[in-house]
Image: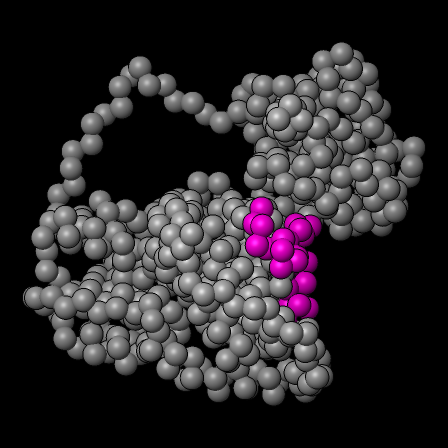
Amino acid sequence: MNNQLLLGAEAIALGAIDAGISGVYAYPGTPSTEITEYIQRSNDAQAQRIRSKWSVNEKTAYEAALGMSYAGRRSLVCMKHVGLNVAADAFINSAITGVNGGLVVVVADDPSMHSSQNEQDSRVYGKFAFLPVIEPSNQQEAYNAVHYAFELSERVHLPVMLRITTRLSHSRAIVVQDTVRLQNELHPEVDKNKWVLLPANARLNYARLLDMQKQLVSFSEASPFTRRIDGEGSFAVVAFGIAFNYVMEILQTNGLNIPVLKISQYPLPEKLIKEFFDAYDTILIAEEGYPVYEELLRGYFDNKKIAGRLDGTLPRIGELSPNSIAAALGIPSPEIRPIPDIVANRPPELCKGCGHRDVFEALNRALEGYEYKHVFADIGCYTLGALPPFNSVNSCVDMGASVTMAKGAADAGLHPAIAVIGDSTFTHSGITGLLDAVNDESSVTIIISDNSTTAMTGGQDSGGTDRLFTICKGVGVEEHHIRTIVPLKKNFENNVAVLKEEFDYQGVSVILACRECIQVVGRKKKQKKA
């Protein structure tokens, strides 16, 4: 079937398969997870032997994708916005090496922080690295943009970023499938100077990257995703990515004839923008996320001519919406009915029967009698231990920070210094912190709440399943201070005793709290029954 109803994430995945990728590399992270999952489930991807297993973190994913590109084949790497922080070293430097086979990095931003610690805008990274950024407005554009991005990547020999947001990733529309391209043949890179970033080589490559910027601008000028919609009056709109949809919805709903310039590619098309700006007195800049392009355009043109997020015409934080665009255009928003009192707020909570619950109950009991009851946690379902009824968690900053923050607190004299981290997060970025603690002989207790999956994003494979004891021993934790408990009600008193023993130990101890995710167990039972 050429017509399919797809999520934006699925449209990207299908586009990548049809564009001839040989591998996808990713670590699960909402709102990007469904891209890799679609490829993993795809019969076509399996028939073409497209590599699609999960990586342990975004840095390893990006570097593996870069290695596939070095070998001459097309590769896709996917992550959420904060995952790009983890992959940033490889991402920035890959702009200096360039690529061989096409390399497209899909980054899914999360304005309004639906499931994230911040709402950073990945376009800043694209600008920082001097790389092309494609920002589709809808699902069909997302599918087409993947094909275009791979062609562009191989034409300019650079990675290309495809930036989407939560609303596009997690909404559905009909997508018309295009032609399918065969995978590249193996042809490894032969220019060593290009890939060996010794200073002498890097300086030449960087100069080459800067020289290419005019060429990249020319590609943006001719981008198939750029549109100009004529209108009347002295007021106009420049819209980027998904914000274009909101603008057009308001214009069509209210019968407005306002000129619009749609832009979906960076570096910005300077000639098109100048011609558009010269024709109107006031320009509203509509972009989802940070005012990245608004800041650039204010540098090019008179600030009095520009309205947007920076002057408060549009909200500075959170997602855009048709209502916020309407307000910026002077159109009253419809009255919102108040939520009835009968509709009670339902805060998030750990699943009934979740092993994390038993971990926190035992942890709270074990901490009774200590002056300091500070627990450093991490990114995962167990972060909900910060909420009632447990109220156990004092910090959650970024992936792996529980271990290193506990170490730093121990170095400051805090005792007990306790970290709670999940099995997938531990293999993602907790191992190196544990090695620091071992090397420094810090007095820390690391509780790895092991549910044998990456539960928060839907139950993907975890890189440390059945290996955590061996990993911790290999890092250097003394074997008799790697303790295993099973977080069940019947084991409560024993678990409390083990926790207290390790809290009192003046050194590095690891407690493996092992119990499979209740949701994964349920799915396995259903599959077995089926």
Q: Residue 447 lies in what quarter of the image?
A: top right
Which quarter shows the C terminus? top right
User: Is residue 369 covered in magenta?
Assistant: no
Judge left or right: residue 32 versus residue 415.
left
Please provide percent x and percent y for residue 459: 62, 36
Please provide percent x and percent y for residue 440: 83, 48
Judge left or right: residue 383 versus residue 295.
right
Query: Foreground: 424 or 298?
Result: 424
Q: Is residue 9 above or below residue 217?
A: above
Q: Is residue 93 above or below residue 8?
A: below
Q: Is residue 178 above or below residue 351?
A: below
Q: Is residue 212 above or below residue 497?
A: below
Judge left or right: residue 360 versus residue 245.
right
Judge left or right: residue 169 versus residue 303.
right
Q: Which residues are magenta?
A: 41-69
Please provide percent x and percent y for residue 216: 42, 79
Please provide percent x and percent y for residue 464: 75, 42
Residue 391 visible, this orientation: no
Q: Residue at x 20, y 74 (%)?
A: 276
Q: Residue 511 lies in what quarter of the image?
A: top right
Q: Residue furthest left?
A: 233
Residue 262 visible, this orientation: yes
* Secondary structure predominantly adopted by residues drawn in magenta: helix
User: Is residue 56 covered in magenta?
Assistant: yes
Q: Residue 358 lies in what quarter of the image?
A: top right
Q: Residue at x 27, y 54 (%)?
A: 245
